Image: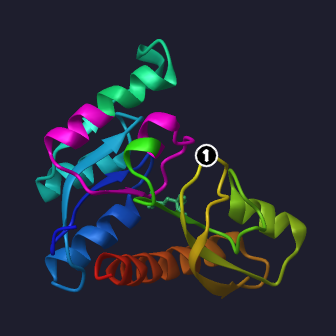
Amino acid sequence: MSATPKIAVFASGSGSNFQAIYDAMKAGDLTGSIALVVTDKPNAFVVERASIAGIETLAIKPANYPSKEAYEHVILQKLSELQVEWIILAGYMRLIGDVLLEAYPNRIINIHPSLLPSFPGKDAIGQAMAHGVKVTGVTVHYVDAGMDTGPILAQAAVTVVDGDREKTEARIHEVEHELYTKTLNQLFSL
Ligand code: GRF
């Protein structure tokens, strides 16, 4: 692997984790560069963030392709052209399929807003609040074919604030931004 790894960030939403990674790289706190943002949601705010940062975006809707394989082949083609070494998922709301998993073995990382294996899948924060847990958190993990099931790289706990979703979510995002950049830095310097 190169000394300054090239990554692609996959996102479907606001992109605050993309922003945190970009800012950390710009500040010299995280080694590497973002070659591409991939989104399945062309109207997602992450597209605007990428444009402001001057980073190329591939906005690609799975519904326009006959299969997941065909969709991922188009993404893979672009990743190969740009010599991307790592795929970093940051709020990408789809399961990664065989085409990308086989092309990037142990090179796809995800962040999830719970202490896995508790509360995998959608709305992990809502699931945790509904369950009445007092402590939840953030997990960074390798991606496999399952839903938030790959080997865990790092975790951090977050106390549920007064049963208040908004406050808890804000704290989770802060912890995510810190934990993701720190964990990626460790991984990239192996
Ligand atoms: C984060 O909570 C992340 O853990 C989850 O999706 C959310 C994305 O947030 N997978 P953002 O788009 O990075 O702001």
Give the image location of residue 184, x and y in percent: 37, 76
Locate the N terminus and report the quarter of the image it occupies.
Answer: bottom left
Extent of the magenta region: 76-101
Picture colour scheme: rainbow
Q: Is residue 57 above or below residue 126?
A: above
Residue occupied by mark 1: 145
Q: Is residue 99 above or below residue 14?
A: above
Give the image location of residue 105, x and y in percent: 44, 54
Question: Image check: 21 left or right of 41?
Answer: left
Q: Can you tell which quarter of the image residue 100 is in?
A: top left
Q: Nearer the viewer, residue 155 or 153?
A: 153
Q: How many marks?
A: 1
Locate the C terminus and report the quarter of the image it occupies.
Answer: bottom left
Residue 84 magenta? yes
Residue at image x 48%, y 48%? 92
The kind of residue tagged 1 is: Ala
